Image (cartoon, rainbow, N blue to C red):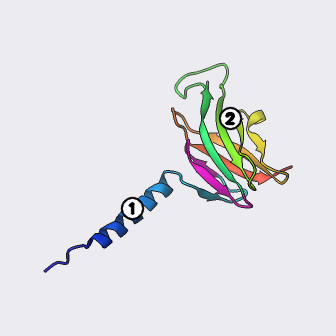
Amino acid sequence: MPLMPTPRHLLSAAVLALAACSSVDGAARAAGPGRPFDLKPGASATLAGGGTLRYLALVDDSRCRPDVQCIWAGDAEIALEWSAGGTAPARFNLHVQPASSRHALDAGRQLHLIALGRGAAPVATLQVDAAP
């Protein structure tokens, strides 16, 4: 005769399933220096060396569509929030254009927007590097 799951077993399975979903959908992730990582809008990353980075939203996207020939490639901008060491969160924006794709997080680190997907909620590929 097969064993029937008890309510305690079902509760444990539900908790494990929810935990797995939260990590897939972008709950806090660890991001190491010099290693690209992806964030979806609303997701956060805990950075090696301390601090939390949150991708707030796509602000603007005027990039040329891939199937169109344009004179100018355009630009896209995302809003981010940085918090570290118990200080108030600081908001800033990054662009896909190289001149505006970096932001100093603290005295030793800078954040770089490497790539940005397409659509209403594009995935951002970011990297933390040593500050120059």
Q: Tell me: 108 left or right of 117.
A: right
Tell me the magenta residue range.
37-50
Separation (CA) of disc 1 from disc 2 = 36 Å
Q: Nearer the viewer, mark 1 or mark 2?
A: 1
Q: Is residue 73 above or below residue 48?
A: above
Q: Is residue 22 above or below residue 16?
A: above
Q: Position of residue 68 (x, y in %)?
A: 55, 22
* Residue at 13% across, 80% down: 1
Evaluate if marks 1 and 2 touch, with contact meaning CB atoms under 8 Å apart.
Answer: no
Along the line of sight, which residue is nearer the eye, 105 or 9?
9
Which numbered dot is residue 63?
A: none
Task: Please tell me how crowded label 2 is: few (under 14), some (14-19), or many (20+) other residues with Cα within 10 Å.
Answer: many
Q: Amino acid at mark 2?
A: Val
Residue 101 quadrant: top right
Residue at the extreme left: 1
Along the line of sight, which residue is nearer the eye, 21 or 112?
21
Q: Tell me: 106 left or right of 128.
A: right
Q: How many marks?
A: 2
The residue carrying mark 2 is 96
Q: Tell me: 11 left or right of 27.
A: left
What element does badge 1 sit on?
Answer: helix
**Which of the two labelled residues, at mark 1 and mark 2, occupies the earlier sequence position?**
1
* Residue at 76% across, 41% down: 102
What element does badge 2 sit on?
Answer: loop
Q: Position of residue 25 (x, y in %)?
A: 48, 51
The residue carrying mark 1 is 17
In reply to whether residue 129 is colored magenta, the answer given is no
Q: Amino acid at mark 1?
A: Ala
